[in-house]
Amino acid sequence: MSATLAAPSPGKPVDAEELLVIACGALAREIGDIVEANGLDHITLTCLPAILHNHPQKIPGAVRDAIREARAAGYERIAIGYADCGTGGLLDKVCAEEGVERIAGPHCYAFYSGTEAFLARGDADMDAFFLTDFLARQFESFVIEPLGLDRHPELRDTYFGNYRRLVFLAQTEDAALEEKAREAAKRLGLAFEKRATGMGDLAGFLKAFAAYDAGGKDRP
């Protein structure tokens, strides 16, 4: 596998068997782990900045640009490591126009949990604020600072007054990371709950993409 946070170089020769996943930077570590664990070394990973989630209207255009840059570099088989992620269907429109597929689900909380199971919970999680491994690591820079809570902690109730729980969706068993999630819950004044999800639907999506060639046949 080649994992990079930069777009593929237009000057790089691409093997016909090479597959590209264009993903959210918040999934970089997890995708890398799945690729390594399953020997999917014909997958190249390129990630867009995770901070785009603070401006979801920018995600479809950024993904389109990345697809076209990758095609110019020689990649033919491309998959998108994004759920809808607040784009209101606009990312699906880009995927349809560009002839690529994305992982199913409204957001990463759903596909880590298993989208069908997550959606089946319905209103049971209406009072839950979710953290993934990535967000537990980056809680300060992706939650506290963008919301201004580092400067104005009194805004906590404005943003989180309707939540009752912080649900930590754990991709790995990491005691230090769980402690970070617990501290995040305490800081927000929320009850803590952990759900060990593993990689959820993400692993199956990547393995299916890796197993299916451009001729429409499964790889041996």
Image (spheres, helix red, strand yellow):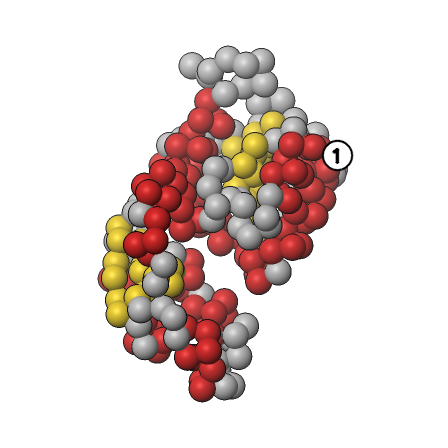
| Residue 171 horizontal/vertical position (percent) | 33, 50
Q: Quadrant of residue 185?
A: bottom left
Identify the residue under disc 1: 72
**Label 1 packing within 10 angstroms: few (<14), some (14-19), many (20+):** some
Quarter of the image that includes the C terminus = top left
Q: On the rendered structure, is 56 left or right of 189? A: right
Q: Nearer the viewer, residue 180 or 127?
A: 127
Q: Nearer the viewer, residue 202 or 54?
A: 54
Residue at image location 60% in from the left, 43% down from the top:
89
| Residue 45 can be seen in this image | no
Q: Quadrant of residue 15?
A: top right
> Eyeballing the image, is 84 above or below 16?
below
Q: On the rendered structure, is 67 left or right of 195? A: right
Identify the element where label 1 is drawn. helix
Q: On the rendered structure, is 139 left or right of 68? A: left
The total number of labels drawn is 1
Q: On the rendered structure, is 123 left or right of 74? A: left
> Eyeballing the image, is 173 above or below 129?
above
Callout 1 amino acid = Ala
Residue at image location 42% in from the left, 29% down from the top:
207
Residue at image location 47% in from the left, 82% down from the top:
155
| Residue 33 horizontal/vertical position (percent) | 39, 43
| Residue 174 horizontal/vertical position (percent) | 27, 58
> Eyeballing the image, is 23 above or below 124?
above
| Residue 31 can be seen in this image | yes
Residue at image location 66% in from the left, 54% down from the top:
58
> Eyeballing the image, is 77 above or below 113?
above
